[in-house]
Amino acid sequence: MPGLIGRKVGMTSLFDVNGKNVPCTVIEAGPCVVTQIKTKETDGYEAVQIAFGDKKEKSTSKAELGHFKKVGTTPKAKVIELSQEDLSGYKLGDVLTVEALPVDTLVDVIGISKGKGFQGVVKRYGFGGVGGTTHGQSDRLRAPGSMGASSWPSRVFKGKRLAGRMGGDRVKLVNLQVMKVIAESNLVLVKGAVPGANGSFLTIEY
């Protein structure tokens, strides 16, 4: 599956052909450099490795420096692999840009959602809380409620929705429409919101 690596810039809005105001996410996608081509003969599977974003040489390991110098490119901040059945259209050092993304194309966007830390059941799962604030229940409004029966099973079942760490997960949104491509600035505008904070890395598959 072909794709690009990008960085989330922020959100804006566009008017479509019907005059409707559509919220969009601005993504700086590419240019990405093909840094390795993996084949079944050498690696056991077929994939294309691409890299994006400049990285300081002093912050790069010697192994990474050698890997990038073999391709003739500067150290990159983000490297991913994309499964690809037909490798004939790729060669080392190729540069992939947003020009390959026509408007109205449907893409999948993968990112790491914003971390929320340790959260209770009201924020994490939308619980309504226990009872009201009357009858002396001063501290029960955002409580999770009953854990389960007493004599049996005498434990809490695995998978019960309780307080815990929220966010910071890999999230994939599918079939987002490309609303606009600004090739000279390496920008692509996709319809709707995508996971992650501004400045975080994203993977665009199309």
Image (cartoon, rainbow, N blue to C red):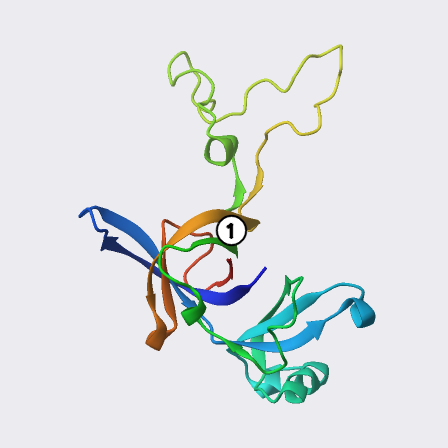
On the picture, is 143 further left or further right than 48? left
On the picture, is 45 further left or further right than 201? right
Residue at image location 59% in from the left, 17% down from the top: 146
The residue under label 1 is which amino acid type? Gly
Residue at image location 56% in from the left, 80% down from the top: 94
Does the rendering let one see residue 40? yes
Q: Quadrant of the N terminus?
A: bottom right
- Rate crowding at label 1 as few (under 14), some (14 to 19) or many (20 or more) other CA atoms within 10 Å: few
Q: In the rendered image, which residue does mark 1 sit on? A: 115
Residue 56 drawn at (x, y percent): 55, 84
Q: Nearer the viewer, residue 27 or 139?
A: 27
Vertical order, 95 against 125 (above or below): below
Vertical order, 92 against 5 (above or below): below
- Which quadrant of the figure has residue 2? bottom right
Residue at image location 17% in from the left, 48% down from the top: 19
Q: Nearer the viewer, residue 106 or 113?
A: 106
* Helix, strand or loop for disc 1: loop
Residue 43 drawn at (x, y percent): 79, 69
- Which quadrant of the figure has residue 181? bottom left
Residue at image location 46% in from the left, 29% down from the top: 126
Residue 20 drawn at (x, y percent): 21, 46
